[in-house]
Image (cartoon, rainbow, N blue to C red):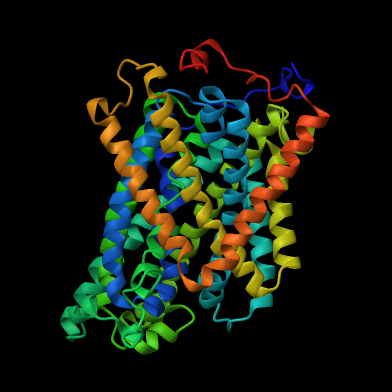
Amino acid sequence: MDETTATRPPLTRSLGGFQVFAISFAFISVVVGVFATYGEMLQTSGPLGVWLWVVVGAGQTLVALVVAQFAARIALSGSSYQWASRLASPRVGWFFGWLSFWFLAIAVVAIANALASQAVMPLLGMDADEDVARWLTLVILAVQAILVVVSTRLLGMVTSAAVAVELAIVAVLVVVLLVVALVTGTVHPQNLVSRGVAEADPQYFALGGGLMAGMLMGLTTLVGFDSAANLAEEAKDPYRAVPRAIVGSVVAAAVAGFAFLLTLTVSIQDVAAVTSDPSPVAAIIRGQLGPVWELILLAGIAFSMFGAGTVVLAAAARQAFAMARDGRFPASRLIGRVDARTRTPIFATLLIVAIGCVLMIALPGEALLQLIIGSTILPALIYAGVVVLYLAVRRRLERRTGGFSLGRAEVPVAVAALVWIALALLALVTPGDALVPVLIVVGLIAVGGVYFLVLLRLRPGVMDEQPGADDEVSRAGTP
């Protein structure tokens, strides 16, 4: 066994069923996704694009059902990295882990930056300023990191509170906005069939055109439901709690998000003005409810976004930790440590913050935006790999008594999920402005390939077998 896999303090199982659900739901975070991408949807597909949320919600639910099949059988930090390493080969698993790590690491920065620019700055009455937003992003990352390393139990409590606040905000906004719009006669159901500023787009219905681009809001929001599997080693009764959290979170987010989007859209009084506003959701709330309600709701939204970002940071740290524990990540001896007092991977958490600092300081605005857009392609690639892996190894997976299972529906669901992912990838890579994001993804894969070859040369035995597989995990299936 490699020195990096030697005996060390274990992670603590301190997360209950609702807290595991809250982690997945907070990662998805309807509030974060809508705040960050609603304006882009209005610009590309117009208000009509809200109906694409239903399509994406159905497709992502299919993927979640397949992911839950794995989570019901292998409960280890690292999710797809662990599943592929144990059921295909460590070499295949390594690439799953590499892509997952970069998706999570970039998502941490994207959420923190959205929190700073879309919620905190409007809440404090600050004018849009990219430099200020970047410094606020670094402060937010530092506070989130402190929370993540202090205690997993505290992380679960804060996440549960953030989810409760988010659900309350969605419920209040749906009810209050509708009531106010109806009473004042400012409800506009015709917005639901309007293209808005995209009315004159000649490529609206073309491949990669405005309508298809409207799918990006759902595709960038309804992801990360597998984050519960990344904290499986810290969950109580993980073989039941984690699969339920994965499926339940994506269904709940899809339903709540659609209600939220419908209400926002019919509440728009001036589509062109809202579309051009730097924070369109805040503009809708302000236009219907006034500045006081805007501030109250923005405060709650900011807290929800903070909780979501904290969960993503924790998941990213666990991904790095899982690979480092097996000796397959840069600085493995350091990143693979669990602190004896807090029982959390402190150095893995600090690594994510360091990456955030580099991205915020080194990348200009347009380059950072392209990197974030490129990261939306990564989960689609990861989920495609997971579904293909499941179809290849499903006969070797042990059926756990009382555990989550699709039964006879497993193959039809997996095939339908694969078809959906192909459609989603088409929507992500065909827009005219997708070339740079695609090249970024190719670059991340290429860098990973180089490191993979270096790792094989310097430590030739590191990919021979999956270390640390206890009897329970081994029964899930071996190559």
Relative vertical location of residue 112 with respect to residue 332 in this rendering, above or below: below
Tell me: 10 left or right of 118: right
Which residue is located at x 72 percent, y 46 percent? 350
Q: Position of residue 396 (x, y in %)?
A: 41, 18
Residue 61 visible here: yes
Quadrant where the N terminus is found in the figure: top right
Work out whether residue 154 or residue 259 is closer to the camera in this orientation and state it.
259
Q: Measured along the vertical axis of the image, is residue 368 above or below residue 448?
A: below
Q: Is residue 55 above or below residue 225?
A: below
Instruction: Residue at 44% x, 43% y: name it.
Output: 384
The picture places residue 381, in percent across and down from the top left corner, at: 50, 47
Report the residue at 31% width, 50% height from top.
59
Is residue 38 toward the left or the right of residue 143 in the image? left
Query: Residue 40: which quarter of the image?
Result: bottom left
Q: Which residue is farthest right?
A: 458
The answer to which quarter of the image holds residue 35 is bottom left
Residue 81 image point, x, y percent: 56, 33
449 or 328: which is nearer to us?
Answer: 449
